[in-house]
């Protein structure tokens, strides 16, 4: 699947939830979900019959894939990684996605969206344990130290992104020093620790890919 270049808010409306694709705007009254705008193609949907099980499963997969700003090939690769791990595949999938470096940069509020976090990593602004890592899909481990490169710390984008840290802090499994733009992965999260994804039914995604 090619890179999506259409309206970002349309994706949120299609999935029926905030995907936080536009950073700061998602927290303001300008957000399409805050305005309670209808799903795109509402008149067409009104004529549709009750969705099939496949349609429900597909919608759940699309929601999670778009939330983490991933292509189908990338998402499927992470699913197959989750399958090979011990434990529940659905839980493993969510945890693996959370451990992506671009997501960690976003969770530490060094970026205002996952899309922006991917660009920050791509452009070489991020160090992991003192070494530059420019692979957004890099999987962090417990105890890893993630920081913004010294030469990049003066960029305005980081100052703007850290406003959300002041509002909401960080996940319990992360630790951040906002003054020095340094964070630590204190532990690998459990599925229950990822509270803002409580509405995601990962079992439906497992059923979809298991067919």
Image: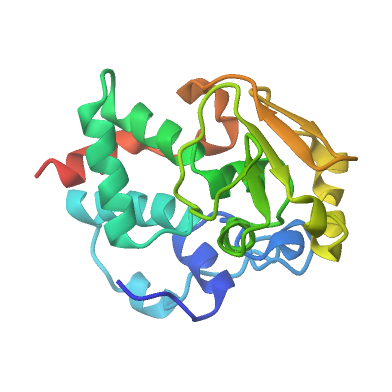
Which sits in the foreground, 110 or 16? 110
Identify the residue shown where x is 70% and y is 61%: 23
Which residue occupies 50% across, 38% down?
A: 98
Q: Position of residue 24 (x, y in %)?
A: 76, 61
Please, is residue 182 above or below residue 23 in the view?
A: above
| Position in image of residue 73 (x %, y %) | 27, 59
Side (left or right) of 182 relative to 201: right
Query: Where is residue 18 shown, x and y percent of the image?
Result: 59, 55
Q: How many marks?
A: 0
Q: Which of 45 and 136 lies nearest the eye of the viewer?
A: 136
The quarter of the picture where the C terminus appears is: top left
Residue extending farthest left: 211
Residue 130 spot, x, y in % from top left: 66, 38
Q: Is residue 199 visible?
A: no
Work out which quarter of the rendered image holds the N terminus and state it: bottom left
Residue 45 visible (yes or no): yes
Question: Which residue ends up furthest to the front in the rendered image?
Answer: 131
Residue 25 relative to residue 42: left or right: right
Query: In the depicted view, which residue is nearer to us: 155 or 22?
Result: 155
In which quadrant of the rendered view does residue 152 lie?
bottom right
Between 3 and 176, the residue placed more toward the observer is 176
């Amino acid at each position: 699947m090619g890179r999506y270049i259409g309206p970002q808010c349309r994706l949120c409306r299609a999935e029926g939830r905030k995907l936080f694709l536009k950073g700061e705007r998602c927290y303001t009254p300008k957000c399409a979900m805050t305005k309670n705008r209808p799903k795109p193609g509402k008149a067409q949907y009104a004529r549709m019959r009750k969705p099939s099980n496949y349609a429900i499963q597909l919608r759940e997969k699309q929601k999670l894939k778009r939330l983490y700003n991933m292509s189908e090939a990338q998402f499927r690769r992470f699913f197959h990684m989750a399958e090979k791990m011990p434990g529940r595949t659905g839980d493993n999938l969510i945890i693996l996605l959370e451990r992506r470096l671009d997501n960690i940069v976003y969770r530490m509020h060094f970026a205002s969206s996952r899309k922006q976090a991917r660009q920050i990593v791509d452009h070489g602004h991020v160090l992991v344990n003192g070494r530059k890592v420019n692979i957004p899909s890099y999987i962090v481990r417990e105890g890893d130290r993630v920081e913004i490169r010294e030469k990049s710390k003066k960029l305005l984008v980081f100052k703007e992104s850290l406003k959300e840290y002041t509002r909401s802090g960080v996940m319990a499994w992360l630790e951040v020093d906002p003054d020095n733009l340094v964070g630590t992965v204190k532990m690998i999260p459990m599925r229950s620790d990822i509270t803002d994804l409580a509405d995601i039914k990962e079992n439906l995604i497992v059923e979809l890919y298991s067919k």
